Image (spheres, rainbow, N blue to C red):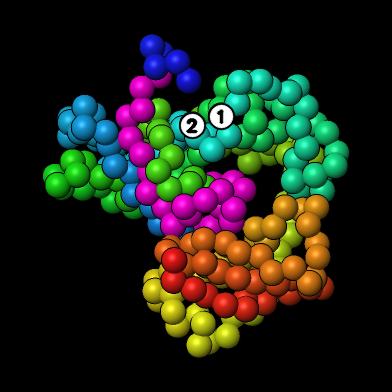
Amino acid sequence: MDGRYFQVIARIHTDFPTKFGIPRQSGLIPDLKAEIVFEPEYRNPDALRGIEEFSHLWLIWEFSGAVRKEWSPTVRPPRLGGNTRMGVFATRSPFRPNPVGLSSVQLDSVQLHTDRGPVLHVSGADLMDGTPIYDIKPYLAFADSHPDALGGFTDQTRKYGLSVEIPEMLLERIQEKKRESLKAVLAHDPRPSYQDDPERVYGMEFAGYEIKFMVEKGILRVTDIELR
């Protein structure tokens, strides 16, 4: 994006070094923890004065792994099987004229004085590790929440999930505080919807490990967990 108009104010640090496996929307997996660390020129604690009074925040960020020079008016949403085309502005696809993302996260705590400057600890993020953030705004329930809003084609696809089986000897390799998050990520099925090969072994990086798994008849079985 043109630096004359947008400046990266911070970067988020998550357990996802690659795009594969990241939740498809923010808030789907509340247990996922992340840190927001500000760039040196924005490490002024005064800029965060009062932020601790809010429970949730909006993050405006860049789809840094999907920046393209050209754009398409239609995209193929994964939850429609990857074959049905919808208008790009009727989706949250990362392939947009401007690669801008919007996520709502829970604010867990604020550290104003660290060796990295102010740090925000958040939950429920759907961002890749190192993603640049352009702005942070408070979430206002009275204005931002619309319980009766229609979800378009997503109303047909939002109920899904897999049963997850992880041998105890493999699960013990993951930090205890991250085990439930891993199970939730896998239960949401990180595979593209058009991939359904029961013989294929998939690999997903999470919290410094490569998680290998297979899926058959609605059951995801972890076959190995290796330190990266």
Residue 105 lies in quadrant:
top left
Q: Secondary structure at mark 2?
A: strand
Relative side of 157 to 45, left or right: right
Residue 81's spot in the image, x, y percent? 82, 48
Q: Secondary structure at mark 1?
A: loop
Q: Is residue 152 shown above or below 182?
A: above
Q: Is residue 112 visible?
A: no
Disc 2 crowd, CA 10 A, few/some/many (<14, 14-19, 20+): many
Residue, disc 2: 62
* Mark whose residue sits in front, 1 or 2: 1
The answer to whether marks 1 and 2 mark residues whose Cβ atoms lie closer than 8 Å is yes
Residue shown at the point (33%, 35%) measured from the top left: 10
The three-letter amino acid code for the residue at tag 1 is Val
Residue shown at the point (50%, 80%) measured from the top left: 171
Residue numbers of the magenta segment: 6-31
Q: Nearer the viewer, residue 218 or 53?
A: 218
Relative side of 159 to 226, left or right: right
Residue 205's spot in the image, x, y percent? 52, 61
Relative side of 214 to 136, left or right: right
Residue shown at the point (52%, 51%) measured from the top left: 18
Q: Is residue 174 shown above or below 27?
A: below
Judged by its main secondary structure, the magenta piece is: loop
Q: Is residue 134 magenta?
A: no
Q: Is residue 214 visible?
A: yes
Q: Nearer the viewer, residue 147 or 41?
A: 41
Q: Is residue 28 shown above or below 149?
A: below
**Between marks 1 and 2, how big is the CA–CA gap?**
8 Å
Residue 224 lies in quadrant:
bottom right
Residue 67: numbered disc: 1
Residue 74's spot in the image, x, y percent? 78, 27
The three-letter amino acid code for the residue at tag 2 is Glu
